[in-house]
Amino acid sequence: MTGFDWDTLAVFLTRRYDDILELAGEHLTVVLISVGIALIIGVAVGLLVWDKPITRSVSISTAAVMLTIPSLALLALLSPLLGLGWGPSVVALVFYSLLPIVRNTVVGLREVPVPILESARGVGMGRVRVLFTMQLPIAWPIILAGVRTAVQLTVGIAAIAAYVAGPGLGQYIFKGLSSLGSKNALNYALTGTVSVVILALLLDAAFLIIARYTISRGLK
Amino acid sequence: MTEPTSAGPFSTVNGAVGIELENVSKIYPGQTGTAVESFSMSINPGELVMLVGPSGCGKTTTMKMINRIIEPSSGSIRIGGNDVLSLDPNQLRRHIGYVIQQIGLFPHLTIEENIATVPRLLGWSKKKTADRVEELLITVQLDPGIFAKRYPRQLSGGQQQRVGVARALAADPPVMLMDEPFGATDPITREKLQAEFLRLQSEIGKTIIFVTHDFEEAIKLGDRIAVLGERSRIEQFDTPSNILSAPANDYVSSFIGQGASLKRLALIPVAEARLGQASGDASGARVDIAGTLRDALDLLVLTGGSSIDVSEGERVVGSISHTAISEALGAAPLAGARQAE
């Protein structure tokens, strides 16, 4: 038998339907939690450094260097410190999400035109009010684009977190790879991979909706 | 209920306030020498003062010290007798209208929300704010039905600048600071905005400090003009017609440029001149009595005649000649139209 056996895949999917959904749910959860944490840290870092040339380039370079560390290596390094499962997975994903979020926060804040800030001060707004009613809303489309990149990045990397027994669809991919030759090896790997791709596409679609409802029409 | 006007911390005279600057200086840190040196000026309630000078002379810095966008290094500034430097800067700015050349409308907010900025900061009720926004849109000749819900990027430059003026006027501040507000618009739009601005000022009578590098604009709009030199030094501070007829020094003369008399003609209405007998020629060229002597001279040159008829609506009320124009010019410094208050 040389062709792919669709019937066994169908049986595989029917039997493990609940299991697959649960893993997809975990995958989604770990991505959202991690990007959520990275959004808070990243925007905070961006706010602290955007108008200071030296700290700004230091933090963006640091985040860029962090991104070059192979995910498998990072997970292996985190495991002795944080054990297995969710802990190292979330930390690693936050780590990778930081670059696009910090960078886009800095770019977004820097692109708010100076006359707008001067006008905001000129009508009697304090610093905090200017930040929350002017700078962040005007920078939001760019920050949101950074969050979107972070989500796409982490959906893929989360699959690798199964290496340290992390949650999500990576478990199927690793199970398939480690049992190559067995009857369901290809079904596991394929189901895991395709599900990750579908999840990534759904999340990307969700961003279009989020952008529609959170970005002022005046900025589009 | 609070009054719709919000003089805020200032005491007013008929709703307007005077401004006193005394020995105000600005030294930027890390720079030798002063950007503005010992600037003193007294501005009457309801007066429109133009600060005119070349780029980098410190005129903008001088103006921005009044609402403390730039903090003065020394000296005192009083608005309506109150020391500006002892007030909370944000409270102060909510009672001073501020218009800048780049307009600085908030791009993520609608026109309505832009104009409502200061009323919201002052905690006005929704109803009162909405009424005020509508009133202001009508004042600056933008149809509320069309423009209220639009965003700044959907408006032309001229329309945006009108919204900028409306936003500055929103809480009816007694003082307005305007930094080359029409500088970035094309000549046709600028002329229109200037005319609208004069009409508006004649209704609202704010105390206005208006910065420009355009002397023509200063003549056209100002009650008084301060010609500024280096470090914001006042070279001359007087009415447009006095500056044109008697420039204080060579610097002021060079700023006026060629044709001071021609410029003065534009300040004097036809009605100021001694009118002669109407020609009785129904087809001849006519200048309206509400026009200026410059309009009259323009027509005289064009027709090549010695005099042209002056009309008031459809009716011819007399004629004006070259001689009458020259005479009016001679008398102008004493009877300048803008001096009468």
Image (spheres, coloured by chain):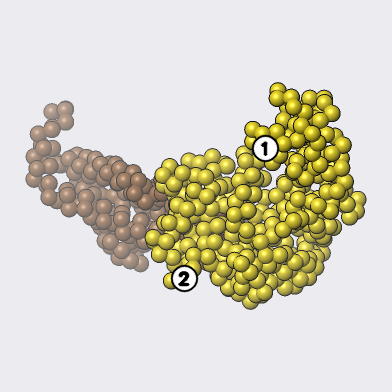
Q: Is residue B200 above or below residue A13?
A: below
Residue A85 % position (x, y): 26, 61
Q: Is residue B105 above or below residue A91?
A: above
The quadrant where residue B158 appears: top right
Which of the two discs, 1 and 2, labels the residue nearer the N terminus?
2
Q: Which mark is residue B2?
A: 2
Mark 1, chain letter? Answer: B
Question: Residue drawn 31% across and 63% down?
Answer: A87
Extreme residue toward the right, this view: B250
Residue B195 % position (x, y): 64, 44
Question: Residue drawn 33% across and 66% down?
Answer: A82
Q: Nearer the viewer, residue A83 or B66?
A: B66
For the C terminus of chain B, the image quarter is: bottom right
Q: Which residue is mark 1?
A: B312
| Residue A198 appears left or right of B309 | left
The quadrant where residue B68 appears: bottom right
For the N terminus of chain B, the image quarter is: bottom left
Please rate how many residues cluster around mark 1, counting C-alpha atoms within 10 Å: few if below 14, some from 14 to 19, many from 20. few
The quadrant where residue B284 appears: top right
